[in-house]
Amino acid sequence: MTSFNFQLIIDYLPYFFKGIIYTIGFSIASIALGTVFGLLIALGKMLPNKFLAAPFKGYVGLFRGTPLLVQILVINFGVVPLVLGKSNSIVAGILALSLNSSAYIAEIFRSGIQAVSEGQGEAAATLGLSPNQTMLHIILPQAVKIILPPLGNEFISLIKDSSLASVISAPEVTYWAQAMNAQYYRVWEPYLTSGLIYLILTLSISSILHSVERRLAVND
Amino acid sequence: MKKSKIYGIVTCIIILFIAVVFGFSKMKDANSSKASNKTIRVLTYANWNPFEYLKNGKLVGFDVDLIKELSKEAGYKYTIKNASWESMFTQLQQGKADVGISGITITSDRGKTFDFSDPYFVSRQSIVVPQNSTVKSASDLKNSKIAVQTGSTGQEAAKKLFGKDNSKILATQSGVTFQMVMHGQADAAIGDNTNNEKFIENNKGNKLKIVKDDKAFSPEYFGLMFPKGTSYKKSYDKALKKLIADGTYQKIYKKWFGVTPNTKELSKFK
């Protein structure tokens, strides 16, 4: 590696900051939507009626079984234009990331819900709670505690996966790293900088999750 | 249980497929009704200094200046958007944009799906090797590992010279080819000469050099790329002729490449 040029990075920082805003935006929106969808899909997948559960199982199979890159392209050029009339890389990026992560999050939720001992549900039924109330007030609060570590894992991969949105020209961190590479014909300055940015973002989210975990552990 | 799962997956795939097909067909409809609109939607893949790149966030380059002048000359308003390479092709194919300019080489394969303008730039491939290499021409690379950019004309040139299924031709992302040569993963890189020169100029400490071989590498011609059956080709070809005749083309060329172009080479295109 010859002569790492820090001045280039300093010159380019404003664009990296723009990119960071998009990367964070993509991540937060997709984490939020992905968690909501994921919970609904997990509940759908566990429906006792096989026919009602089948589409949810198919959804998880489809989104876990195809590359995210392909999903991003299909959603950007096929699905989003159908709804909005034209492609929009930001909408497509958030949609693809949320739909993709929701498939994984659904499985995380399901594992958590199934890990809560059956006695809890039975006890709730004895107390006269309806199945819905049992799920909402008894099972889910305990499940959430169990699934926090794998959920954190998923959030971290989601932040890094958002870099794939650069293929549809969403102006996030990787997009600007590529643009910087093209402008200066330099490889290390842009890509190591983007790596460092992702590292800072993922370390921040893991420390946030860690403190949430500790807070919830107080009730144990 | 298993059956219902498969059923669910199949349903989802079908739904998605229908959505995509429907989406594509709808876009085409929307486009054809706008055919009389005289604002040209230009796409480029701004990842190639000096042809088109983001200079501090702004879209600049030889192609960018040229398409602006050409559009003005032809009497069109224009919008220029940055897209990725694949997405540029997709959008043009779907008629969601009117013209692509991005150092696109005119090839007969691409000509099956797109229309091209007359050529506006002549380019040649060249070889990048370490400074201490003894390679003097393309034929010296016969048993070497060669790095090329995926989907580029450099890749095609390497395949033509050394065999289509040659496992020693290593395809990778742009920019990475030089790294592979520097770190000994490949013995040489074949790529566009303008690109090679720019990289070496910007990375002087890397001990790489260029080997040219105009016999092995036939010239490539860049053209504006239109959706098949476009109505704009004629006016852009006319505008290009005019800009070459009045010297505007030469001025733009000099600005970005520092030399005066040999415009006669353009007319050698068959």
Image: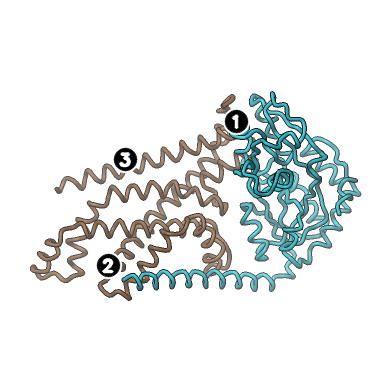
Chain colours: A brown, B cyan
Q: Which chain does the residue under circle 2 lie in?
A: A
Above/below status of B25 relative to A11: below
Pick the residue in front: B126 or B243.
B126
- At 41% across and 38% down in the image, what residue appears? A200
Q: Front-most of B198 and A31?
A: B198
CB contact under 8 Å: marks 3 and 1? no
Q: What residue type is labelled 1?
A: Gly
Picture mark count: 3
Going by the numbered disc 3, the residue's amino acid type is Ser
Q: Which secondary structure lies at badge 2?
A: loop
The percent position of residue B245, horizontal first and vertical second, equals 91, 49
SS at mark 1 in the image = loop
In this picture, residue A57 sits left or right of residue B170: left
Residue at which label 2 appears: A46
Quarter that holds the N terminus of chain B? bottom left
| Residue under the point 50% across and 39% down | A194
Which of the labelled discs sits on residue A207, or is there none? 3
Residue A134 visible from this viewpoint: yes
Mark 3 burial class by Cα count in 10 Å: few <14, some 14-19, many 20+: few
Label 3 secondary element: helix
Return the mark for residue B184: 1
Q: How crowded is mark 1: few (under 14 residues within 10 Å), some or many (20 or more)?
A: few
- At 55% from the left and 60% from the top, the residue drawn is A88
Tag 3, which chain? A
Residue A200 relative to residue B26: left or right: left
Residue B56 in the image: x percent, y percent? 62, 40
The extreme left residue here reads A126
